[in-house]
Image: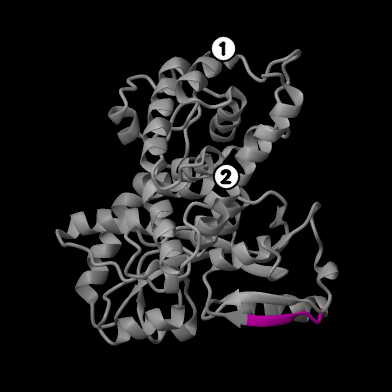
């Protein structure tokens, strides 16, 4: 899945061709691949400038983007607070020149450091405290803000400018076909995809400011009774299942994620069908379907991770990111001689699944994943469970 992936898949159908995807994060390398004939199209949000226009032909604009500074702060920061800090930017982007204009206009002395890493990886590094500042397309920054509480994207680097894709200058027929497709799709399909990936919050951080129920007495939600019944079937403390439900949907039966997951336990359509859920907005059906899926995951891991408390973490991670990615991390843990029955060891390798050195390893079957998101997810659910245990009786 992904914004560009879905656009290209639709373009492939229009052209009646099978699209071959070549994934690169280095923009300069993408231009080299295009020039050398290794690819026919650069499907990145490229801002047009004179230097690039001499090398390629740009398609019709697919939209616009503005650029923001990204940092971690409890309150909106100001440019003055940056001082002589280093700001890391993705190599080959227009971010460096945009920052230079800001630095000159405000008479600042921050340092600009180019990095081969993608914007999202740099944002991950900001969240982890490895670097203090980076710059990103506002759309990417806004989407990542739903993952990381405290991400500050309030400082604008550059106002909106149009973005497009690029083809070789000797590909006029391809350019014409792509432009025709953009014109046809821009009003509905492209705008709908843009909303799906950049305007719809990706998780439940936005649902409430407190991780605790506002209900009085010894209760967590209005669904406590059916959660307790479902938890018995699963063999879990009901407050753990309640924590998972909260994390997934905020106890909102109508919750719908950007990826199409629905209901209290945010099951994807294929999972709903597999486990017999005909109405995902029915709390009983949603919980039963989710519990069946959790039992399936528990049975999958039980031989590899026999200790119950450790296995729960594997199950939660699999529920969040997919069993295949966690299994990849398990295989990497085995390969490097670590303890495959300990979540902390496997979580370490799951966090590395966004690193090409690891996701391209022959033992990895499911490819790239932002594994650290799943590691944080497990931590959040178990943290919430701990809070519920303090506040609510069994």
Query: Does residue 248 lie above or below 48 as drawn?
Result: above
Q: Which residue is mark 1?
A: 225
Say which element carries label 2: helix
The x, y position of residue 211, in whole percent, is 70, 32
Q: Which residue is mark 2?
A: 378
The x, y position of residue 255, in whole percent, is 50, 29
Q: Which residues are magenta?
A: 108-113
Quadrant in which the C terminus appears: top right
Residue 193 falls left or right of residue 154: left
Question: Who's the residue at 67% across and 35% down the image?
Answer: 384
Residue 220 falls left or right of residue 21: right
Which of the 4 image quarters holds residue 273? top left
Residue 95 falls left or right of residue 42: right
Confirm whether the magenta stretch covers residue 112.
Answer: yes
Question: Who's the residue at 37% across and 65% down the image?
Answer: 60
Query: Could you say which is closer to the camera, residue 193 or residue 337?
Result: 337
Question: Who's the residue at 70% across and 28% down the image?
Answer: 388
């Amino acid at each position: 899945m992904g914004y560009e992936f879905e656009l290209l898949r639709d373009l492939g159908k229009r052209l009646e061709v099978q699209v071959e995807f070549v994934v690169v994060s280095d923009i300069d390398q993408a231009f080299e691949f295009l020039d050398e004939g290794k690819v026919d199209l650069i499907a990145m949000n490229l801002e047009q400038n004179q230097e690039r226009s001499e090398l390629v032909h740009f398609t019709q604009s697919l939209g616009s983007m503005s650029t923001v500074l990204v940092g971690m702060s409890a309150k909106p920061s100001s440019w003055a607070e940056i001082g002589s800090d280093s700001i890391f930017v993705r190599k080959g982007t227009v971010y460096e020149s945009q920052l230079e204009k800001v630095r000159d206009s405000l008479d600042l002395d921050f340092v600009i450091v180019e990095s081969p890493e993608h914007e999202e990886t740099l944002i991950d590094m900001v969240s982890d405290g490895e670097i203090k500042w980076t710059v990103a397309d506002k759309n990417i920054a806004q989407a990542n803000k739903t993952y990381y509480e405290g991400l500050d994207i309030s400082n604008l680097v550059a106002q909106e400018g149009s973005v497009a894709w690029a083809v070789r200058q000797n590909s006029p027929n391809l350019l014409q076909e792509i432009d025709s497709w953009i014109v046809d799709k821009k009003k509905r399909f492209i705008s709908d995809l843009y909303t799906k990936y950049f305007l719809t919050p990706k998780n439940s951080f936005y649902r409430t400011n407190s991780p605790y129920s506002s209900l009085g007495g010894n209760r967590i939600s209005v669904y406590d009774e059916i959660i307790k019944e479902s938890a018995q079937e699963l063999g879990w403390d009901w407050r753990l299942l309640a924590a998972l439900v909260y994390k997934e949907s905020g106890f909102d039966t109508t919750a719908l994620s950007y990826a199409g997951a629905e209901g209290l336990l945010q099951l994807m359509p294929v999972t709903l069908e597999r486990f017999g859920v005909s109405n995902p907005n029915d709390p009983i059906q949603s919980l039963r379907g989710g519990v069946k899926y959790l039992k399936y995951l528990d049975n999958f891991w039980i031989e590899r991770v026999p200790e119950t408390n450790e296995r729960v973490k594997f199950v939660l991670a699999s529920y969040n990111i997919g069993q295949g990615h966690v299994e990849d991390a398990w295989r990497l843990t085995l390969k490097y001689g670590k303890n495959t029955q300990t979540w902390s060891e496997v979580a370490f390798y799951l966090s590395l699944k966004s690193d090409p050195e690891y996701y391209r390893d022959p033992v990895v079957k499911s490819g790239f994943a932002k594994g650290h998101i799943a590691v944080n997810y497990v931590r959040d659910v178990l943290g919430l469970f701990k809070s519920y245990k303090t506040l609510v009786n069994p």
